[in-house]
Image: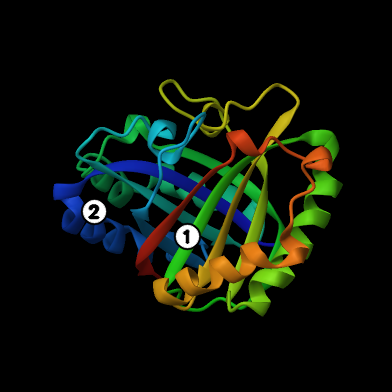
Amino acid sequence: MTYVEGFVAAVPAANKEAYIKHAASAAPLFKEFGANRVVETWGDDVPDGKVTDFKRAVKAKENEVVVFSWLEYPSRQARDAANERITNDPRMKEMGASMPFDGQRMIIGGFVSIIDEGAQGTPGYVDSYLVPVPTANQSAYREMAAKAAAVFKEYGAVRIVEAWGDDVPDGKVTDFKGAVKATGDEKVVYSWIEWPSKAHRDAAWPKIMADARMKADHANMPFDGQRMIFGGFSPVLNS
């Protein structure tokens, strides 16, 4: 199963090119350390929520854009070995000293994939989600997600990943648990849907929502949908 190191950060809109350059410089090192894939996506359709949202998750300011990014590793062990090398590599320390965003508000965590449908490629657009799920509901959530993934693929999604919180640390300023107001018995799910393009995604969603198979059974939902975070993102790096 793919192991995912997930990130969400707030980047000043004026620093977009600097951020892309920074990410492009770091990507080869992550690959050198053992990552199979490095993806960076830039906030495009990130709505405000009533209870939670991506902007509040990283305390984004008015002039900042939310970035949703991830590294894919073959295993938790490979991720752990990579992080040890990252911590001790002078090249990474140099990059860390000149980041074009506030690293204290970046949230980070490790996740084990429980759904991984479709092939890796070059996504044209990404729908991203953070979901708080009671630990006892893992099987029910996975079953629901698997059914939804089949529908998404039918309407043109090229890859769907649902990853279960495994190594999700508490942060001093922000963290994944706070992002979705997770309670003590809940895990954070980090998930995304890759589409060929934004136009394809925009055309597919009305059909998906009208599909009877996607009708929500609110009485038996395995998570609190009011605390789910979602948004649309444009890829700026896929390595």
Q: Amino acid type of disc 2?
A: Tyr
Q: Amino acid type of disc 1?
A: Phe
- Which residue was labeled with disc 2? 19
Q: Crowding at label 2, few (<14), some or many (≥20) Cα neighbours within 10 Å?
A: many
Answer left or right for 95 relative to 139: left
Identity of the residue drawn at 56% across and 76% down: 120
**Mark nearer the N terminus (2 vs 1):** 2
Residue 23: give x, y in percent of width and height: 30, 58
Identity of the residue drawn at 20% across and 54% down: 16
> Is 170 situated above or below 164?
above
Between 22 and 124, the one nearer to me in the picture: 124
Q: Is residue 214 in view?
A: yes
Between 126 and 114, the one nearer to me in the picture: 126
Between 25 and 194, the one nearer to me in the picture: 194
- Which residue was labeled with disc 1? 33
Q: Please state, as top left, top right, bottom left or bottom right, where the C terminus lies in the image.
A: bottom left
Q: Please state, as top left, top right, bottom left or bottom right, where the N terminus lies in the image.
A: bottom right
